[in-house]
């Protein structure tokens, strides 16, 4: 595919995240993004979404979108319980897929999704958009470049208090709800990116009345001696940040860590130096452009968010849930 050829997108799902991605794709029209199709389980929802966003091809059902010959890439904006099923349908039809985080309910599902995409030779990536933002790209370069020396501790987390609604996916165990898969995945993914997969995971927390996790603390040990202490909560309010403590300094990824715009670097006993990293629009454009580059070049995965690391993150999340005693009905 030519480097200038348009990439035709479809979105599975019509909720809040689908609206955000639709708007971001519209902003990338000058770079070849075309929002071509949308799918929902109900025809009315697909048709209404299509009208709002000027989409030509609404589909009743995700298999119908996967079979659409006018779609090159699919964004899966569905609850975690549906990620594996719909990804397998789309990759089986030869579509490139960008799947909303968390990538799956568990590592077993993730492994099947990855194997299926590789067998078809199609692109697949977890939509961990944070990794593509300028502040996180810079943080990774600083850490790997030894700016603070070997990292020994990672400390961070945050909390928010949403209105309780058992119908929301966040509180619905059948849909893969809970704060770990919703928000904790950001912390686990960043720890994996900067420290490597953990060799040990200890988790303590509490389950809420709907059976999903509402708060937890994760203690992780990593190869080379680094440790991480991370927390997430639906019962407290604190914008999430992250601090890396190295032998020669410290690096703070300022809140909110899922969309940071500032780093604070301190070397030795020097005063900290703040650097700003503005984010354009919603911040989802860089990951969408990554998929478009891959589709045009024929690549099957991203070096920024490789599939092996996505699988490692899912294994860590599984270990954390085991410490909480949380299992989903599908498991």
Image (cartoon, rainbow, N blue to C red):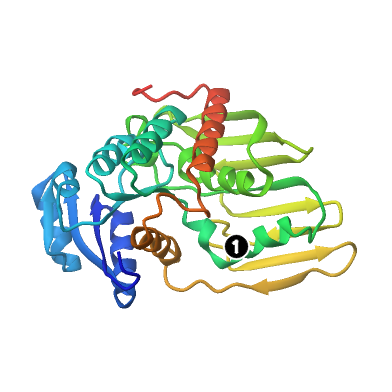
Q: Which residue is mark 1?
A: 137
Residue 121 lies, in percent from the top left, at 34, 44
Taking the image as drawn, is residue 278 in sight? yes
Residue 200 location, quadrant = top right
Residue at the outermost bottom position: 30
Residue 84 lies, in percent from the top left, at 33, 36
**Residue at the image position 62 percent from the left and 41 percent from the top:** 231
Q: Quadrant of the C terminus?
A: top left
Residue 212 lies, in percent from the top left, at 44, 31
Is 175 located above or below residue 21 in the figure?
above
Residue 25 lies, in percent from the top left, at 31, 67
Q: Quadrant of the N terminus?
A: bottom left
Instruction: Report helix, strand or loop for mark 1.
Output: helix
Residue at the outermost right position: 269
Compare residues 275 and 65 and report the one nearer the observer.
Answer: 65
**Residue at the image position 31 percent from the left and 69 percent from the top:** 2
220 relative to 65 in the view: left or right: right
Compare residues 148 and 3 and report the one nearer the observer.
Answer: 3
């Amino acid at each position: 595919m030519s480097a200038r050829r348009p990439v035709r997108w479809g979105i599975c799902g019509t909720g809040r995240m689908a609206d955000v991605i639709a708007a971001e794709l519209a902003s990338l029209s000058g770079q070849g993004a075309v929002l071509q199709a949308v799918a929902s389980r109900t025809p009315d929802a697909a048709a209404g979404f299509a009208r709002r966003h000027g989409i030509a091809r609404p589909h009743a059902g995700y298999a119908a979108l996967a079979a659409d010959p006018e779609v090159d890439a699919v964004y899966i904006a569905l609850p975690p319980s549906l990620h594996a099923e719909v990804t397998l349908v789309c990759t089986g039809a030869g579509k490139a897929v960008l799947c909303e985080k968390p990538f799956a309910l568990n590592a077993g599902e993730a492994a099947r999704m990855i194997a299926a995409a590789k067998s078809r030779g199609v692109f697949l990536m977890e939509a961990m958009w944070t990794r593509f933002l300028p502040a996180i790209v810079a943080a990774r370069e600083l850490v790997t470049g030894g700016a603070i020396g070997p990292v020994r501790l990672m400390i961070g987390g945050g909390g928010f208090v949403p209105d309780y609604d058992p119908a929301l996916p966040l509180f619905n165990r059948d849909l893969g709800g809970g704060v770990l898969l919703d928000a904790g995945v950001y912390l686990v993914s960043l720890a994996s990116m900067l420290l490597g997969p953990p060799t040990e995971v200890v988790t303590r927390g509490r389950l809420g009345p709907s059976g999903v996790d509402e708060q937890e603390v994760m203690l992780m040990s990593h190869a080379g001696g680094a440790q991480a202490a991370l927390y997430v909560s639906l019962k407290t309010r604190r914008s999430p940040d992250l601090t890396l403590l190295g032998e020669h300094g410290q690096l703070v990824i300022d809140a909110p860590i899922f969309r940071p715009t500032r780093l604070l670097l301190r070397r030795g006993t020097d005063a900290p130096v703040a650097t700003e990293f503005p984010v354009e629009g919603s911040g989802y454009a860089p990951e969408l452009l990554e998929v478009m580059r891959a589709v045009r070049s024929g690549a099957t995965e991203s070096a920024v968010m490789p599939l092996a690391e996505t699988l490692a993150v899912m294994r860590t999340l599984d270990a954390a849930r085991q410490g909480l005693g949380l299992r989903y009905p599908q498991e």
